[in-house]
Image (cartoon, coloured by chain):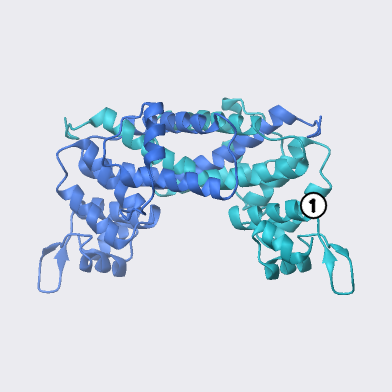
Chain colours: A blue, B cyan
Amino acid sequence: MRISQLSGETGVPVATIKYYLREGLLHDGRLTSATQASYDESHVRRLRLVRALVGGAGLSIAAVRDLLGVVENPPDSGHDLLGFAHQAVIGSEVAPVDIAGVDSMLGDWGWDLDGCDVAAKSSVAEALEGVRSAGFEMPEGVLDTYAKAMYEVAAAEIAGVPTESAESAVRYVVLGTVLVEPLLLALRRLAQQSASHERFGARPLRP
Amino acid sequence: MRISQLSGETGVPVATIKYYLREGLLHDGRLTSATQASYDESHVRRLRLVRALVGGAGLSIAAVRDLLGVVENPPDSGHDLLGFAHQAVIGSEVAPVDIAGVDSMLGDWGWDLDGCDVAAKSSVAEALEGVRSAGFEMPEGVLDTYAKAMYEVAAAEIAGVPTESAESAVRYVVLGTVLVEPLLLALRRLAQQSASHERFGARPLRP
């Protein structure tokens, strides 16, 4: 198909397609004349993935380029592939945070992590530090509840990772991680209102 | 105490205290001369709350002013008080979203919500729409897992709401809602890595 048809098929403007071609996010078509190239289904699929990563997940062009390299030459281990997808979302810049406290919590929770997950551990350490430095004290046991609930969430998500191709797995992990975040937070607020209704009903706060 | 002592006690610069006084976020001190006022413990407490709401939770001055009005004249029902706190975080501008789908899910989940929670329901509807419009399909049953996990989170949080004063309850709800969000998301990503390690280990993605 010609570039205009590729655009029609995917809803991506021709100018944007040309930009992705220049940036190496989309492989060249087959040249049919000096000025014209022909595109196929592989371009449609790739273009949809790029749109989802850039538009849906909000990744930078550079992060998408890195990730596409991983999709094309997937690492041997499935866990490593997901690790790359995760890294694209979290970013690889790790602030120098003390993660010893996080490591000790993970031991208590029995989470199965190898030494390479420093970025994700640091995010947890930073988030905990943010809570503490604002002077907010979590009630006893609530952090463990958070961990348990998030593990249930993650286990269901990882069980659903499609395995038919590296492309589909990466798409699932990146989009799922980013797009579901607002959903989880919105569900939490709605659940809080329901739980508050249950606890306080129309009763005054002070007994 | 004088304003300089109030500043020393709370770590809030004198200029910021004066700004809060002008904006009505802090009640006036007792005038001791034409140009000097005296402040007490109630100012320390209020200033700490304002700092937490503005700095920690990132609320606007207008939202904090509204919320302080609620703290001073708390509604009769504890649930309504938490509703006001929630509204300050979510914002009261509700986009015209179709929440019928959300209402029907809530029925399935058995959540106890009255008709007034339109803003939170709309956030859920919008988040679901965001997931769908990016072409991401959640695996069967995962949405129910999200709801169940978020209800566990919310129930533990609401059980911890302090009831000794409207001030402490509002502080808890607003700060807890906002500050804990990055923590939950970071825990989810870390849990995903652990679950991925468990599912895929060092095995290649393709069986």
Depth check: A164 or B168 in front? B168
User: Which residue is labeled 1 in the image?
Assistant: B42
Q: Is residue B23 above or below residue A170?
A: below
Mark yes or no: residue B4 visible: yes
Depth check: B190 or A141 in front? A141
Question: Where does the image place residue B95, in percent across and percent down from the top left?
Answer: 62, 53
The residue that appears at 41% across and 30% down in the rendered structure is A151
Left or right relative to A59: residue B148 = right
Amino acid type, label 1: Ser
Q: Is residue A24 above or below residue A92?
A: below
- Disc tally is 1
- The quadrant of the picture occupied by the C terminus of chain A is top right
- The quadrant of the picture occupied by the N terminus of chain A is bottom left
Q: Mark 1 lies on which chain?
A: B
Question: Where does the image place residue A12, in percent across and percent down from the top left?
Answer: 33, 61
Q: In this view, does A12 lie above or below B108?
A: below
Left or right relative to A77: residue A181 = right
